[in-house]
Amino acid sequence: IRATGRPRLVGRHAGDGGVHPMRIGVLAVQGAFAEHMAILDAIGVEGVAVRLPSDLEDVSGLILPGGESTAQRRLIDRWGLREPILGLARSGAPLFGTCAGMILLAREISDGDATTFQLLDVAVRRNAFGRQLDSFETNLQVPVLGDQPVHAVFIRAPVIERTGPAVDVLARLDDGRVVAVRERNVVATAFHPELAGETRFHRLVATMAAEHDDPGEGSGRRPHPTRRAGLAR
């Protein structure tokens, strides 16, 4: 799967014979969710603000945005979202976490904070690059997204310190630190592609969602794209 071109806009929502936009949820309890909604709109996908379990009905995937991971975890539990989100992931629908969203997905948090979903076999360290004043931008090579570098915005970003055997590394910094990964239907970045107007990660998630909605698209028959590209773990 290469995240180029416009994603297929039909799926489980086309049962009435019409063509309906794909619907992908964006967790909207706290943090920078509006920017993700704007990117989804730009690529022809209907974004759904998710604040309650009922908001997850009929979505084909979910984005967990940047923000404050501890506050997000508390609000997820307050509004009863933990089990419904886990159920969505278990169904095979794609989840995409950026910055704090990656922390929510991680199996282990190195500095001791409580975990949330544990859907991604990685250990992350929060605020690995320092405080707000230490935020930076850089270009990254992400082979699964094509040859054009990805412009990445790092704001109080975490870093991945350990990856499990089933985790594919999508991107590293020049010093070798891992900042983007995928494990089956879960994708995560330490940075904010949405703040740079970068759409290719969202297109990748939309493609994964289309394959989840319609297995005939081939998700069960093709090798994982990062494995085909020969990326190291």
Image: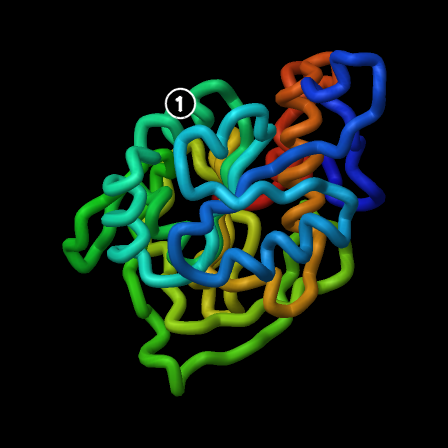
The image shows a total of numbered marks equal to 1
Which residue lies under the disc numbered 1?
87
The image position of residue 68, as x and y in percent, is 33, 62
The image position of residue 101, as x and y in percent, is 41, 51
Which color scheme does this rendered protein use? Answer: rainbow
Residue at x-position 30% and y-position 39%? 79
Residue at x-position 69% and y-position 41%? 46
Residue 182 seen by the camera: no
Judge whether 166 appears above or below 13 on screen: below
The image position of residue 232, as x and y in percent, is 53, 45
Residue found farthest to the bottom: 133
Judge whether 2 appears above or below 201 on screen: above
Q: Is residue 95 left or right of residue 87?
A: right
Compare residues 208 and 39 and report the one nearer the observer. 39
Residue at x-position 56% and y-position 59%? 34
Judge whether 132 appears above or below 125 on screen: below
Query: Would you call the spot at circle 1 few (<14 residues within 10 Å), some (14-19), or many (20 or more)?
Result: few
Q: Is residue 12 left or right of residue 153?
A: right
Q: Is residue 169 left or right of residue 115?
A: right
The image position of residue 75, as x and y in percent, is 28, 48
Quadrant in which residue 54 is drawn: top left
Judge whether 28 appears above or below 215 on screen: below
Q: Secondary structure at mark 1?
A: helix
Kind of residue at disc 1: Gly
Residue at x-position 55% and y-position 55%? 171
If the image is split into quadrants, where does the N terminus sit?
top right
Q: Is residue 5 left or right of residue 207?
A: right
Residue 103 seen by the camera: yes
Compare residues 118 and 26 and report the one nearer the observer. 26
Quadrant in which residue 194 is drawn: bottom right
